[in-house]
Image (cartoon, rainbow, N blue to C red):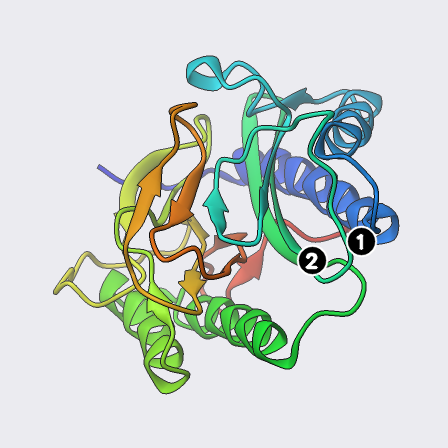
């Protein structure tokens, strides 16, 4: 069952989303060749705590970090590590959640490290475009397949792989709530109503759709080892335009 969020819950979620946006603003500033994923995790953790919030990911099902840091062919759930440092030409996906007043904001972005190839830049551009195409469909009266189809259309146009085992999800009191949102059409005609909040998060690959989980039981990578990008916003359906929760508040 999808839970419609109250005005007070939305207010707290917007504050949580603001904190997520603060983390991403800082990530964009500090990601450069030579920085370790553990350093990035520490920076994110400090921002979240300074804002009197809780790092949602830390300890979630035993996850050891405040962020997921996934490099190149890693799709999601990369574990921060002091020995893993990004280098020129890499891409790194940073996924972060913050819990404020019992409500969660969840957002991810894929960043270039220095200069990247035109083909990898095309992947980033298309995945970001797919995110906003999906967000545009987060409207009262639409159905979940409208979001999924908008994401899939961008992926198909760019001939990109679509990660099929992972996708978007409801978010609120918990990081993962109903519904699950596929990044391709599956015939889901669940109605979207104002007050619904969903984390929309396309994960697209330069190669195949297929992914595998590493021996650490967390890190998900493409089977063909080609790069993957991940962009995510937490989005509220209103009676008018969709509202992005995970953005800086004025």
* Res 55 → quadrant: top right
Decide: marks 2, 1 in contact (CB < 8 A)?
Answer: yes
Q: Residue at x 15, y 60 (%)?
A: 188
Q: Which mark is residue 161?
A: none
What distance separates the C-alpha of mark 2 from that of mark 1?
Answer: 7 Å
- Is residue 24 at least partly visible in the picture? yes
- Seen from the viewer's position, the closer of residues 188 and 78 is 78
| Image quarter (top left, top right, bottom left or bottom right) of the N terminus | top left
| Callout 2: SS | strand
Q: Dot 1: few (<14), some (14–19), or many (≥20) neighbours within 10 Å? A: some
Q: Is residue 196 visible?
A: no
Residue sitting nearer the eye, 210 or 174:
210
Q: Which residue is mark 1?
A: 28
Q: Position of residue 212 (x, y in %)?
A: 32, 42
Q: Please provide percent x and percent y for residue 176.
A: 38, 33
User: Along the polypeptide, which appears first: circle 2 or circle 1?
Assistant: 1
Say left or right for 24 vs 209: right
Residue hosting label 2:
111
Residue 141 in percent (x, y) is at 28, 67
Say whether residue 103 is left or right of residue 75.
Answer: right
């Amino acid at each position: 069952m999808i839970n419609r969020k109250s005005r007070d819950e939305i207010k707290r979620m917007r504050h949580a989303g603001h904190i997520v946006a603060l983390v991403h603003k800082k990530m964009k500033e500090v990601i450069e060749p030579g920085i370790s994923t553990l350093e990035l995790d520490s920076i994110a953790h400090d921002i979240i705590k300074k804002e009197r919030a809780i790092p949602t990911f830390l300890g979630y099902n035993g996850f050891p970090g405040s962020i997921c840091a996934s490099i190149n062919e890693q799709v999601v759930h990369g574990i921060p590590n002091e020995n893993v440092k990004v280098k020129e030409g890499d891409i790194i996906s940073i996924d972060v959640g913050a819990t404020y007043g019992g409500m969660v904001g969840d957002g991810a972005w894929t960043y270039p490290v220095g200069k990247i190839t035109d083909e990898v830049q095309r992947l980033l551009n298309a995945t970001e475009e797919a995110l906003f195409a999906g967000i545009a469909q987060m409207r009262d009266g639409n159905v979940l397949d409208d979001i999924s189809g908008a994401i899939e259309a961008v992926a198909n146009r760019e001939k990109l792989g679509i990660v099929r085992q992972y996708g978007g999800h409801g978010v609120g009191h918990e990081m993962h709530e109903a519904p699950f949102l596929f990044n391709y059409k599956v015939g889901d005609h669940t109605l979207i109503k104002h007050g619904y909040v969903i984390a929309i998060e396309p994960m697209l690959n330069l190669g195949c759709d297929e992914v595998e989980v590493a021996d650490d039981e967390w890190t998900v990578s493409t089977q063909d080892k080609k790069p993957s990008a991940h962009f995510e916003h937490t989005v509220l359906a209103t009676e008018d335009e969709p509202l992005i929760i995970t953005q800086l508040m004025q």
